[in-house]
Image: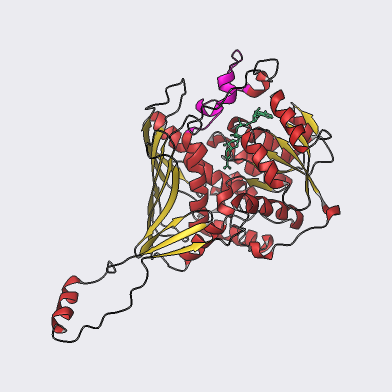
């Protein structure tokens, strides 16, 4: 959907949906220059670019995911990594080993942003740095691929949306699943009525290992000599160097966003993409710290319940999300959408569609009995049974969601169009995940206006 038309459509929709444009928050007025709708341009129309059209990138936060992002990014033709930034010597050494000694390395991300030879950056830092680095990068006219969740707190979202619109640069949030063939197929099936009218969705993340529960290995040489600890803290309280806080930052609220910011956010991104939703209006979470009592400040089991209102895009439905880091059945995850005529399990490379076997909910049982009686003496010829489940699978050789998400990002830079997950979408996916934490810690339900991005 080319940018200009859909931008105009979005603006019109916003205007129509709100009584009086004076009520439109500034962030949405600013975002009217961008499309709120997914760019559904098919990945089948892929084309490759010449070598002299190289996009040069810098990696900021060269840890686990930043490195995975960079490794995927450079497999997109015409993309070259020329710089890396991290706060830990060991990670900078690893980056030089991976990408060549000639890359520029630094512990100060601003040095990357001031380089003229860099077109785009990947922000793979912990969550508490996403907003600052992304906004700073966009103000320096760099395109940004920022890991999820887009922000650490909902109060930070508007600044990112505004920076994207002000600078007219490409900004993509890294919930790669929504660029997958599986998510695209699910969106298509839902729109075609394959599961009838959507009324419920659920998602689950189960783990049962120290690594899965964020107890990452701490390198022996970790110290305030090898780590820029002051920089890591950002605006959060000063304290002596603490290797656990640095390497297992997810466990601490100043830097991470708990299981909901880490994992629910993927499910929100996919669900909102598939259903065209802007988000829930009621949010309630419960959970507890049951097992991994290693000083962490966040629960290891969390359940979130969400109420999605009826909108022009979808019927009203409920969502239930769970994370369990003490699940004896081991690792697994799923996203399932349920409708009046079936359900579908959505994976990144596979969708399994289940049909309602016995009857449609609207069937009249009395009528069915009457018909049966009437035909009792007649010959009952058997019928052909349709399969209970239909499986859609990606072709062998599919490069996967991560590649598709990066391909979408770099194509948007080259073709000057919107991405799959821009700042407004990323904000709407992050908000209910972050509000889950607020609901859990404050022990109360939260009301949210996903259209106007406001707490009620
Ligand atoms: N999309 C996904 O599937 C996915 C998967 C895992 C993680 N993530 C996200 O990626 C981000 C990083 O997670 P991770 O698991 O790679 O963590 P990590 O700890 O392995 O890596 C983070 C790196 O950022 C560096 N860093 C911290 N502050 C910095 C700063 N100000 N400037 C430069 N570098 C800085 C750290 O030194 C560290 O090397 C998180 O936001 C996480 O939610 C996304």
Left-right relation of 389 to 119: left
Please say whether residue 245 is one of the residues in the magenta stretch: yes
Give the position of the C terminus as an image quadrant.
top left
Which residue appears farthest toward the bottom when viewing the image?
378
The picture quadrant for ligand 1 comes to top right
413 vs 353: above or below: above
Stretch of the chain drawn in magenta: 233-258
Which residue appears farthest toward the front when viewing the image?
396
Residue ID at (78%, 52%): 78
65 vs 277: above or below: above
Would you say the magenta stretch is mainly helix, strand or loop? loop
Residue ID at (71%, 45%): 166
User: What is the quadrant of residue 305 in the picture?
Assistant: top left
Q: Position of residue 275 (x, y in %)?
A: 48, 57
Left-right relation of 367 to 53: left
159 vs 215: above or below: below
Residue ID at (56%, 49%): 24
381 vs 117: above or below: below
Please say whether residue 317 is one of the residues in the magenta stretch: no
Q: Is residue 440 visible?
A: yes
Give the position of the N terminus as an image quadrant.
bottom right
Q: Position of residue 302 (x, y in %)?
A: 40, 36
Q: Is residue 276 visible?
A: no
Q: Nearer the viewer, residue 136 or 394?
A: 394
């Amino acid at each position: 959907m080319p940018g200009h038309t859909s931008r105009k459509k979005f603006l019109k929709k916003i205007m129509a949906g709100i009584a009086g444009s004076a009520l439109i928050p500034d962030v949405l007025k600013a975002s009217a220059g961008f499309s709120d709708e997914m760019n559904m341009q098919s990945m089948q129309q892929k084309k490759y670019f010449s070598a002299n059209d190289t996009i040069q990138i810098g990696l900021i936060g060269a840890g686990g995911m930043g490195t995975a992002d960079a490794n995927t990014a450079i497999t997109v033709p015409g993309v070259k990594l020329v710089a890396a930034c991290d706060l830990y010597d060991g990670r900078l050494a690893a980056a030089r080993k991976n990408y060549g000694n000639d890359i520029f390395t630094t512990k100060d991300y601003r040095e990357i942003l001031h380089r003229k030879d860099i077109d785009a950056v990947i922000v793979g830092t912990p969550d508490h740095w996403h907003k600052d680095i992304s906004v700073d990068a966009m103000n320096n006219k760099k395109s940004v691929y920022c890991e999820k969740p887009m922000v650490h707190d909902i109060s930070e979202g508007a600044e990112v949306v505004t920076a994207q619109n002000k600078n007219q640069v490409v900004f993509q949030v890294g919930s790669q699943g929504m660029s997958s063939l599986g998510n695209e197929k699910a969106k298509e099936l839902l729109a075609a009525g394959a599961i009838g009218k959507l009324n419920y969705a659920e998602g689950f993340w189960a783990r049962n290992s120290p690594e899965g529960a964020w107890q990452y290995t701490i390198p022996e040489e970790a110290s305030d000599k090898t780590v820029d600890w002051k920089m890591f803290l950002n605006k959060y309280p000063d304290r002596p160097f603490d290797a656990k806080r640095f390497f297992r930052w997810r466990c601490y609220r100043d830097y991470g966003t708990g299981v909901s910011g880490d994992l629910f956010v993927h499910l929100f991104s996919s669900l909102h993409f598939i259903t065209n939703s802007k988000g829930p209006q009621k949010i309630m979470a419960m959970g507890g710290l049951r097992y991994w009592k290693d000083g962490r400040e966040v629960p290891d089991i969390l359940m979130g319940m969400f109420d999605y209102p009826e909108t022009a895009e979808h019927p009203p439905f409920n969502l239930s999300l769970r994370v369990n880091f003490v699940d004896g059945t081991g690792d697994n995850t799923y996203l399932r959408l349920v409708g009046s005529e079936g359900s579908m399990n959505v994976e990144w490379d596979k969708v399994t569609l289940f049909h309602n076997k016995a009857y449609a909910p609207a069937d009249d049982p009395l009528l069915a009995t009457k018909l049966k009686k009437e035909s009792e003496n007649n010959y009952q010829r058997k019928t052909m049974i349709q399969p209970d489940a239909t499986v859609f699978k990606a072709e062998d050789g599919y490069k996967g969601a991560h590649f598709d998400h990066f391909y979408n990002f770099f194509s948007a830079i080259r073709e000057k169009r919107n991405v799959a997950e821009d700042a407004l979408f990323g904000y709407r996916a992050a908000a209910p995940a972050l509000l889950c934490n607020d609901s859990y810690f404050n022990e109360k339900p939260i009301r949210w206006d996903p259209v106007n991005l406001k707490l009620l």
